[in-house]
């Protein structure tokens, strides 16, 4: 999206270009890249750029609870990244328990990153 003034006397140094990228689209892109590396046998975890995208996305969901999410926020996250549980009962409970490796009733960024790594390593393809 380019913002341009219709005034011929506009200062070109103030023309700003914005690119709107939604985090779920960016997530899909990096998840696909990680999956492709896994298929080629060269996946050793997320790159620095991929980790930054995952961490930034996590920050959106973890912000209300100081970097941690509960079961219902996990549901929101899974729906946003197009990896929803089969249902909001047993499967969501099982998914939450699986991700909550510290067994403290919350999922933090480290647990999220571990789960993304595990999903790629296990060959889970969503896109």
Image (tube, helix red, strand yellow):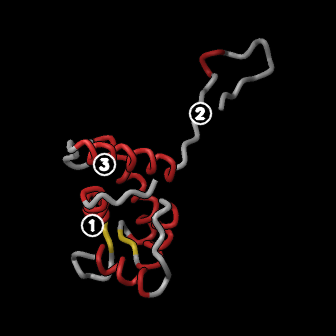
Q: Is mark 3 on a helix, strand or loop?
A: helix
The residue beneath circle 2 is: 18
- Quadrant assignment for the N terminus: top right
Circles 2 and 1, Cβ within 8 Å, touching? The answer is no
> What percent of the width, then of the height, locates residue 115?
29, 64
C-alpha gap between disc 3 and disc 2: 23 Å
- At x 76% / y 12%, what residue is drawn? 9
Left or right of 8: which side holds 118? left
The residues bearing labels 2 and 1 have C-alpha atoms spaced at a distance of 33 Å
> Image check: 30 left or right of 17?
left
Residue position marked by numbered label 1 in the rendering: 111
N-terminal of the pair, mark 1 or mark 3, is 3
Seen from the viewer's position, the closer of residues 24 and 125 is 125
Residue found at the very far top of the displayed protein: 9
Q: Which of marks 2 and 1 is nearer the N terminus?
A: 2
Name the residue: 46% across, 53% down.
127
Secondary structure under the numbered disc 1 in the rendered image:
helix
The reply to whether discs 3 and 2 touch (Cβ–Cβ < 8 Å) is: no
Residue at position x 39%, y 84% in the image: 93
Which numbered mark, 3 or 2, is in the foreground of this view? Answer: 3
Residue designated by label 3: 51
Residue 112 vertical position relative to residue 6 in the rendered view, above or below: below
Q: Residues within 10 Å of mark 1 (few under 14, many from 20)?
A: some
Front residue of 83 and 76: 83
First in residue order: circle 3 vs circle 2:
2
- Give x and y (percent) for residue 79: 51, 66
Estimate how packed mark 2 is, as few (under 14), some (14 to 19) or many (20 or more) residues with alpha carbons within 10 Å: few
Q: Distance between the residues labelled 1 and 3?
A: 13 Å
| Element type where label 2 sits in the image | loop
């Amino acid at each position: 999206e380019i913002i341009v003034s219709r005034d011929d006397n506009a200062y070109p140094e103030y023309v700003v270009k914005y690119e709107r990228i939604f985090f779920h689209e960016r997530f899909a892109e990096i998840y696909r890249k990680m999956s492709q590396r896994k298929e080629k046998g060269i996946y050793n975890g997320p790159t620095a750029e991929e980790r930054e995208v995952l961490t930034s996305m996590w920050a959106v969901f973890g912000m209300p609870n100081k970097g941690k999410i509960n079961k219902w926020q996990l549901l929101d996250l899974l729906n946003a990244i197009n990896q929803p549980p089969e249902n909001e009962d047993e499967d969501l409970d099982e998914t939450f328990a699986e991700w909550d490796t510290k067994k403290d009733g919350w999922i933090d960024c480290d647990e999220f990153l571990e789960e993304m790594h595990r999903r790629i390593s296990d060959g889970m393809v969503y896109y």
